[in-house]
Image: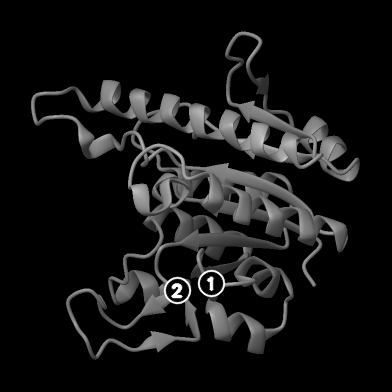
Amino acid sequence: MYKRVIIKLSGEALAGEKETGFCDSTIDRISAQVIEIMRKGVQAALVVGGGNFWRGRSGSGEMDRVKSDQIGMMATVMNALYLTERLRIRGVHSVVMTPTIIGVVTEQFSKDKALEYMKKGSVIIFACGTGHPFFSTDTIAAIRGAELEADALLFAKNIDGVYDSDPSLNGMARKLDHVTYKQILTDGLRVIDLAVCGICMELDMVSIIFGLHEPGGLLSAVSGDDNEIYRIGTKVTV
């Protein structure tokens, strides 16, 4: 079983079937799985997106990309704060960390403080991305994974793994149990950002891409058992 993981949650996933805002039943199901893996001794940090409110491409063509991305960063902060509250209701302490302090709302990221919190059983939630435009929340997941020496990056998505072609366009698309970062790059399998592939290749980090709505999916992803991982998603290695 992996001992320390970074879990990337898309903002859209937090909305459930509502497509925007928050779906408490979905968030509570995610929270319950996070709590369960922590009870098994896994240290967990979450990276949350903001797509249930705003994405960088949400603005009109006339909108400045930098401003659009900054709005997206604020959306991730809202999601992180909501997640902390749903975890608090379940009796779990969590901390929102951002690249820069946002008043009294968040703490500034520090590797030492983040590790200390996790060792004490708190959940760290990373928001606001890198703090800079043009970088996705996938990228910050890889960066924080490298900084915190995580055993694996877990990408919980609305699709249950990596396919050899787009399953929404090709009904014969085949799910792949295992791929390399190089395959993702050369075959154009756009499931994670190119920057993520570069970071993970350089540092030899494992990624698991799996379906968020798969029952027990997170537990299977952290198991480290290839058979369990293949059942719910795709394992990505160097």
Quadrant where the image shows the N terminus: bottom right
**Label 2, residues with CA under 10 Å away: few <14, some 14-19, many ≥20:** many
Cα–Cα gap, marks 1 and 2 = 8 Å
Earlier residue among tags 1 and 2: 2
Q: Is 3 positioned to the left or the right of 60 in the image?
A: right
The residue nearer to you, when weighing 48 against 66, is: 48
Residue shown at the point (22%, 74%) measured from the top left: 168
- Determine whether 74 is above or below 151 in the image: above
The residue nearer to you, when weighing 19 against 131, is: 19
Q: Which residue is mark 2?
A: 160
| Residue 128 seen in render | no
Q: Which amino acid is tagged 2?
A: Asp
Q: Is 125 positioned to the left or the right of 64 in the image?
A: right
| Residue 56 seen in render | yes
Looking at the image, what colour scheme do you see?
one colour
Quadrant where the image shows the C terminus: bottom right
Within the image, what quadrant is residue 53 found in?
A: top left
Residue shown at the point (81%, 55%) measured from the top left: 38
- Determine whether 16 is above or below 51 in the image: below
Q: Which residue is mark 1?
A: 214
Residue shown at the point (35%, 80%) measured from the top left: 163
Q: Is 172 positioned to the left or the right of 195 in the image?
A: left
Q: Give the number of the mark in front: 1 or 2.
A: 1
Residue shown at the point (62%, 49%) measured from the top left: 28
On residue 44, which mark appears? none
Q: Which amino acid is tagged 1?
A: Glu
**Label 1, residues with CA under 10 Å away: few <14, some 14-19, many ≥20:** some
Element on which disc 2 rests: loop
The residue nearer to you, when weighing 72 against 199, is: 72
Q: Residue furthest top?
A: 103
Give the total of numbered labels.
2
